[in-house]
Amino acid sequence: MKIFVLLGHPDAGSFNGRIADRYVEAAVKAGHEVRVQKLGELQFDPILHQGYTTIQPLEPDLLISQQHLLWCEKWVIIYPLWWGSLPALLKGFLDRILLPGFAFKYHEKDPFWDKFLSGRKAEVINTCDSPSIWVWLVNRSSDKRALVTATLKFCGIKPVRFTRISRLRYLSEKQRERSLEKIERMAARN
């Protein structure tokens, strides 16, 4: 399987970085082809200065991201929950690469759209300090709904498997290692 892993945490030395590293190692070991990008190492402007009315030229790193996305069969996105949502840099990245004409296209005479990224699936891995039940009860899993439903599925990417590693700041190193072992098992399968 062709897998594009995106580390959506700006700090590659974070626990999210460890997740990405372990995922990649296990996927390669299982025989998958893997391409990786670490958001904090990419050079791009995350701001849509004129919305989608005028598409600003994509920087080389974003063009590579689009190539990886077209190449892959599975897109793996790893990110932390910040303020009930995605990190701003990850949101800006998605705003910049999932463009009209690339990821989707609205129909002229009806309320529907074409989903140009169909045929791919996704695996989303999220970390947060709160208990999962709190994120669900208080925030209604706002990050999951925004990324999985309003973004990935909107562009045709499905199914999307979502894994949340919660209470991260309270996990011992042994508990974190068990989480990483679970990630390795996820990476080895299709």
Image (cartoon, grey):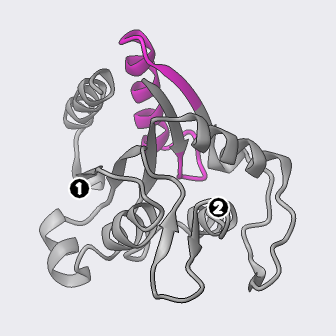
Q: Is residue 100 above or below residue 121?
A: below
Q: Position of residue 119 (x, y in %)?
A: 42, 44
Q: Is residue 146 left or right of residue 190?
A: right
Mark 1: few/some/many CA within 10 Å (<14, 14-19, 20+)? many
**The N terminus: image quadrant:** top left
Q: Amino acid at mark 1?
A: Ser
> Residue at position x 32%, y 67% from top?
144
Q: Is residue 182 left or right of residue 33?
A: left
> Residue at position x 64%, y 61% from top?
93
Label 1 or label 2, whichever comes before in sequence order: 2
Q: Amino acid at mark 2?
A: Phe
Q: Secondary structure at mark 2?
A: helix
The residue that label 1 is drawn on is 166
**Numbered circle sitting on residue 93:** 2
Asked whether the viewer can see residue 21, the reply is: no
Q: Secondary structure at mark 1?
A: loop
- Residue stretch in magenta: 7-35
Residue farthest to the front, as pictured: 109
